[in-house]
Image: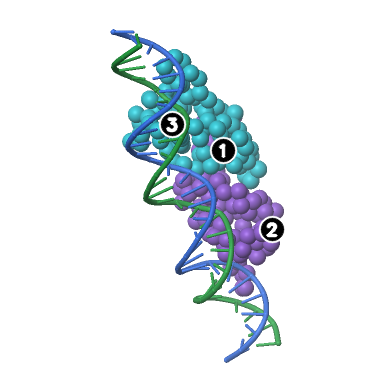
Chain colours: A purple, B cyan, C blue, D green
Amino acid sequence: MGIQQTLKAISDPSRREILDLLKSGEKTAGEIGQHFEATGATISHHLSVLKNAGLILDEKKGKYIYYELNMTVFEEILSWITAFTGGD
Amino acid sequence: MGIQQTLKAISDPSRREILDLLKSGEKTAGEIGQHFEATGATISHHLSVLKNAGLILDEKKGKYIYYELNMTVFEEILSWITAFTGGD
DNA sequence: ATAATATTTAGATAGATATCTAAATGTTAT
DNA sequence: ATAACATTTAGATATCTATCTAAATATTAT
């Protein structure tokens, strides 16, 4: 993980859209894919990048894999930025 | 500008290092370049990306061009993140 | 067991980008 | 006006990455 991986991950618009989708709660890879025109393989790749960056967590439930936001890593970005803004 | 350009800009480690350098105050392109092994052309490219993203401002003073942080754009990133974290 | 479904992995390709060298632009000093 | 200095721009190249198709893995249902 680390800030580099995190910022690379959120620098792609499709991945940010995935994160936005997950705001409303956990979703399967398939449900996420339905919101895009890209193939399942492409979505899977993006999910993998987000997961390696620690931005999302996955949980296997039978046939499905559920993805959800991992808030803790957002804190890391937050602290990188507040180092500039001073937190106000 | 826009969040896309901003996040792309800060996803490169050299550019983040430039931003870190500018925390301590405005610096010329040459002064910034001295902190890196890269050529002046490369630094100039990074400065251009940061400038187009609105993260830095430039001011020409005679022979030199001074660069400084533009705090206002950091606020935009901040608000993107707090949309997830809820601001606490 | 076999078929159907969900998701990932492998391998290929096209487009993006970080970097370089060389040349161009603009400013100051001689 | 010419030389020296500061920075950018142009063009080339190598690496990175988003995307695709096809194949593999894993689970559930028949």
Q: Is residue D26 left or right of residue D16?
A: right
Q: Nearer the viewer, residue A10 or B57?
A: B57
Task: Give residue B23's mark.
Answer: none
Residue A60 drawn at (x, y percent): 58, 68
- Label 1 and label 3 in one chain: yes
Q: List x then y, in percent, for residue A12.
A: 57, 49
Which residue has dot 1 on it? B6
Which residue is denoted by mark 3 in the rendering? B44
Q: Quadrant of residue A61?
A: bottom right
User: Which element carries disc 1, helix, strand or loop?
Assistant: helix
Residue occupying the point 69% across, 58% down: A35
Tell me the chain of label 3. Answer: B
Q: Name the residue: 50% across, 43% down.
A: B11
The amino acid type, in three-letter code, at marker 1 is Thr
User: Circle 2 sits on which residue?
Assistant: A35
Q: Earlier in the sequence, mark 1 or mark 3?
A: 1
- At label 2, the amino acid type is His
Within 10 Å of disc 3 (Cα), the crowding (few <14, some 14-19, many 20+) is some
Residue plotted at (51% across, 23% down)? B58
